Amino acid sequence: MVQDKNTKQWTLIGIVSWGIKCGEPGIPGIYTRVTEYLDFIYEHAVSN
């Protein structure tokens, strides 16, 4: 998530796709860009 410094609005950019020991220093996490899946998210979030 990132926050716009002017509006203070938060925006979700990516979610954890997978990782080992999430948040451990020196161990990378794999993230998915949310904008690539907005149609899917809206379709399923609205219908449920």
Image: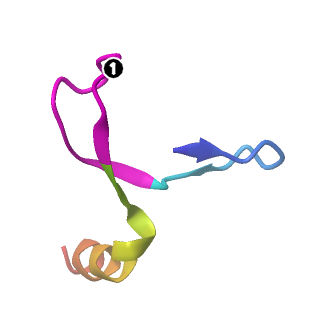
Q: Is 17 situated above or below 38?
A: above
Q: Which residues are magenta?
A: 14-30
Q: Position of residue 22 (x, y in %)?
A: 24, 27
Q: Is 19 situated above or below 35?
A: above
Name the residue: 22% across, 77% down: 44
- The image quadrant of residue 43 is bottom left
Q: Nearer the viewer, residue 12 or 32?
A: 32
| Extreme residue in the front direction | 26
Left or right of 31? Residue 7 is right
Q: Nearer the viewer, residue 4 or 44?
A: 4
| Extreme residue in the top direction | 25
Left or right of 7? Residue 17 is left
Quarter holding the C terminus? bottom left
Name the residue: 33% across, 20% down: 26
Magenta residue check for 46: no
- The image quadrant of residue 28 is top left
> Disc 1 marks which amino acid?
Gly
- Residue pointed to by mark 1: 26
Name the residue: 27% across, 71% down: 45
Q: Position of residue 31 (x, y in %)?
A: 33, 50
Name the residue: 79% across, 49% down: 7
Number of labelled discs?
1
- The image quadrant of residue 25 is top left
Q: Is 9 situated above or below 39?
A: above
Label 1 residue SS: loop
Q: Is 29 situated above or below 36?
A: above
Colouring: rainbow
Magenta residue check for 29: yes
Question: Tag 1: Cα neighbours inside 10 Å, few (<14), some, or many (≥20)?
Answer: few
